[in-house]
Image (cartoon, grey):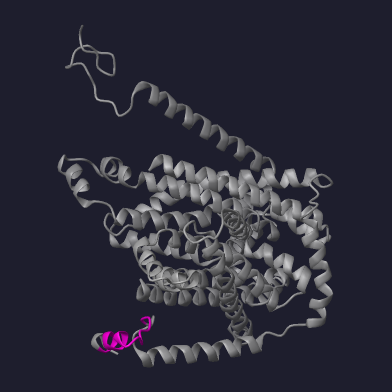
């Protein structure tokens, strides 16, 4: 339907909102493909309903546990796990960002030569594709159980995340300021320090705060594969069916994430 | 009285340009001191809990690991198509279920469409709790409740997606233009009609973009859900790691890498088409 036909139809009170995809054939093809795929997908789920029915009472127990979380009976373990998680988060974020800055500069097409660009981009691709947990498995094998493996994992993941966003940011900077500094006869390092750095700094700080937040959340997970932190404590409590303790740990995680989110939004407002 | 310059010299020729005032310089210095001490304290904590003998061994272990991973056992690949299909199913159905729950949540949480302040805080609470807990933890909980299998994975992905989609969508709703909404309301439209003709068309592109982006992330996350028993290719990964069959692990890694690249490509294409 073209514009005139639509207007004529609208005057007769037959107006319809514009479809999301304009080409009708393409639209129907997409809808049919989606329906067929969904049918196939739903058929391929096999659910053991007897097991689900049996588990539902356990589920109710778990939800009830949130009403009476037990912070004390495993208090020592929770505290140890929490301190481990927090230290891992901080050190990995700092190390990750320090390493991400050269990679990010190298991955910005407007200041890096092509070979460096390709090398840095491939580091970013590898670091971003694999889930933290998968990387953690490899580092646990290499460095042994404990928080060091977790810290290296999170630092590695931070490199991919920060370097990609930093590189995009550097590619978007105002080229005239770079030109102006270069015209004064500045060396490469001075160029970075006085032309590029001031332009990307506010966003870099904002992203670092955001990454700190992500690293804490991830540190709660990589403990499952033996990389230390609160995740290990949570895993143990769940496999012992100590739902009250698990609920307490989850509440602590939610609380800390909320707090860091609140702080980071304030810091971001303050630097921008 | 002579003019005093920021560095306390009275002569313009002696005055030197400085980026910060002295007070600010001290504050910055203190912040750095505090930050570095905190970092070193944390580092010491980690270092105390580390067996450095194992770390010294790390390069040898790494080389050993790579030598065991190569060459990948290609004949194992044909057993992986079904788990891979399951992984994609978990991600897709989980995303759809998550979107379905996040959609009303976002409208209740946006300042300009929420019916009441109390409902708004409840919706925000749902969004924050969902965001704080990783899908792997959700999966761990659901596996103890529902038993191992794809269903636990789907629900875990869905529960995690509520927070992500909900947060980005409610921010998009809060940023809409108020004039179309007022125009629709002025025709005497009901509340639901205002939503569907005034608000919805404005957030639809953002919504589609956010959903496909989350789908892309969910593909990545669903590859590891099997580690806690929630189905997909992670189950095979777990089995291969537990039996130390590193040549199988490497083929699973290659498959995951390829799947993630394809999903990222699709997601980037579709997002470009919408925005």
In the depicted structure, whether residue B17 falls above or below residue A259: above
* Residue B50 appearing in the image: no
Q: Residue A236, position in %: x, y?
A: 78, 57
In the depicted structure, whether residue A60 falls above or below residue A17: above
Classify residue A13 by image quadrant: bottom left
Q: Is residue A193 left or right of residue B63?
A: left
Q: Which residues are magenta?
A: A5-18
Q: Residue A5, position in %: x, y?
A: 26, 89
Pick the residue in front: A180 or A21: A21
Q: Residue B223, position in %: x, y?
A: 60, 72
Q: Residue furthest left?
A: A183
How many numbered badges does the structure rendering display? 0
Does the magenta run of residues contain A11?
Answer: yes
Which residue is painted at 63% across and 67% down in the image? B159
Of the 4 image quadrants, the one containing the C terminus of chain B is bottom left
Q: Residue A70, position in %: x, y?
A: 81, 49
């Amino acid at each position: 339907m073209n514009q005139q036909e639509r207007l004529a139809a609208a005057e007769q009170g037959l107006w319809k909102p514009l479809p999301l995809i304009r080409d009708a054939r393409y639209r129907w093809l997409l809808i049919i493909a989606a329906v067929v795929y969904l049918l196939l997908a739903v058929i391929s789920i096999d659910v053991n309903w007897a097991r689900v029915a049996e588990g539902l009472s356990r589920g109710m127990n778990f939800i009830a546990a949130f009403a009476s979380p037990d912070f004390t009976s495993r208090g020592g373990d929770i505290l140890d796990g929490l301190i481990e998680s927090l230290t891992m988060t901080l050190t990995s974020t700092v190390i990750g960002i320090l390493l991400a800055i050269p990679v990010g500069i190298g991955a910005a097409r407007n200041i890096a030569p092509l070979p460096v660009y390709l090398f840095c981009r491939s580091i970013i691709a590898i670091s971003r594709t694999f889930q933290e947990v998968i990387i953690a498995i490899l580092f646990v094998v290499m460095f042994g159980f404990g928080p060091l493996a977790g810290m290296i994992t999170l630092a590695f993941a931070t490199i991919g995340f920060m370097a990609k966003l930093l590189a995009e940011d550097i590619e978007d900077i105002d080229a005239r300021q770079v030109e102006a500094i270069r015209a004064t006869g500045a060396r490469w390092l001075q160029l970075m320090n006085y032309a590029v750095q001031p332009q990307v700094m506010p966003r870099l700080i904002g992203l670092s705060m955001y990454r700190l937040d992500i690293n804490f959340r991830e540190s709660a997970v990589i403990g499952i594969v033996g990389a230390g932190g609160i995740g290990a404590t949570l895993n143990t409590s769940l496999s012992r069916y100590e739902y009250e303790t698990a609920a307490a740990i989850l509440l602590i995680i939610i609380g800390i994430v909320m707090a860091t989110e609140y702080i980071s939004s304030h810091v971001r407002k303050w630097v921008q | 009285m002579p003019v005093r310059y920021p560095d306390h010299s009275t002569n313009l020729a002696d005055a030197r340009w400085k980026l910060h005032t002295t007070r600010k310089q001290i504050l910055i210095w203190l912040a750095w001191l505090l930050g570095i001490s905190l970092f070193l304290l944390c580092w010491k904590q980690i270092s105390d809990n580390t067996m450095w003998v194992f770390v010294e061994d790390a390069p040898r272990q790494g080389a050993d690991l790579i030598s065991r991973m190569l060459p990948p056992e290609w004949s194992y690949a044909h057993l992986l198509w079904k788990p891979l299909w399951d992984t994609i199913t978990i991600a897709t159905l989980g995303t759809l279920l998550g979107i379905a729950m996040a959609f009303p949540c976002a409208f209740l949480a946006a300042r300009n469409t929420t019916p009441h302040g109390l409902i708004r805080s409840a919706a925000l609470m749902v969004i924050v709790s969902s965001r704080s807990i990783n899908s792997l933890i959700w999966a761990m909980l659901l596996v103890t409740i529902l038993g191992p299998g794809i269903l636990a994975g789907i629900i875990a992905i869905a529960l995690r997606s509520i927070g992500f989609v909900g947060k980005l969508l409610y921010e998009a709703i809060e940023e809409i233009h108020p004039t179309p909404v007022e125009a629709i309301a002025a025709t005497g439209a009901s509340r639901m009609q205002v939503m569907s003709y005034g608000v919805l068309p404005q957030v639809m592109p953002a919504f589609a973009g956010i959903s496909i982006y989350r789908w892309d992330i969910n593909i990545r996350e669903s590859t590891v859900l099997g580690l806690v028993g929630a189905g997909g290719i992670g189950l095979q990964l777990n089995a291969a790691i537990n039996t130390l069959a590193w040549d199988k692990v490497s083929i699973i890694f290659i498959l995951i890498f390829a799947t993630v690249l394809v999903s990222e490509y699709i997601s980037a294409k579709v997002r470009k088409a919408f925005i």
